Image (tube, rainbow, N blue to C red):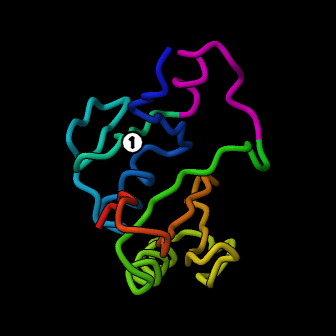
Amino acid sequence: MTAHVIPTLLGVRDLEAAKRFYTDGLGWKIKNDHGISVFFEAGGASSIGLYGREGLAKLVGTSPEGGGFSGVVLTCEVSSEARVDKVMAEAEEAGATILKAPAALPWGGYGGTFADPDGYVWRVGHSAQGEDQSSSE
């Protein structure tokens, strides 16, 4: 198996509310809306999809119950420290919970983290380590 994983599916409690968070709040564009799931335009990156939590749990054969830190962090690298601040502000305004405010990181980068309304943890960062780092914008 190669390490090429797409799309990432997030099981959400309220599909319509989650769609609003990502579209109205963060400005994401919907690529496909299937009613029970929605996928966003990836812009060259790994795609993200939303799926009703109950349905996704059933699909993969597990319980929809759970809470706390899952051990998974979704990461978005952006083009500048100013862009980190902007994305974090957009997320907070859209209803995200700021877990760590943007700040300098020990290895020379800059970043912050937020949890979306379903508790998924997103790290938004900028790397000062080189131009070969990919970024979303």
**Residue 72's spot in the image, x, y percent?**
66, 44
Give the residue displayed 62% in from the left and 71% down from the top.
97
Residue type highlighted by circle 1:
Ile
Q: In the rendered structure, which segment of residues is drawn in magenta?
A: 53-66
Circle 1 SS class: strand
Question: In the rendered view, would you say 33 is above or below 111?
Answer: above
Number of labels in the image equals: 1
Q: Which of 64 and 126 is in front in this view?
A: 126
- Residue 69 lies left or right of residue 84; in this view the side is right
- 116 w.r.t. 38: above or below: below
Residue 85 in percent (x, y) is at 46, 84
Quadrant holding the C terminus: bottom left
Specify whether residue 65 is painted magenta: yes
Q: Which residue is drawn at 30% across and 32% down?
A: 35
Look at mark 1 in the image and give the residue it sits on. 48
Q: Which residue is drawn at 45% across and 59% down?
A: 76
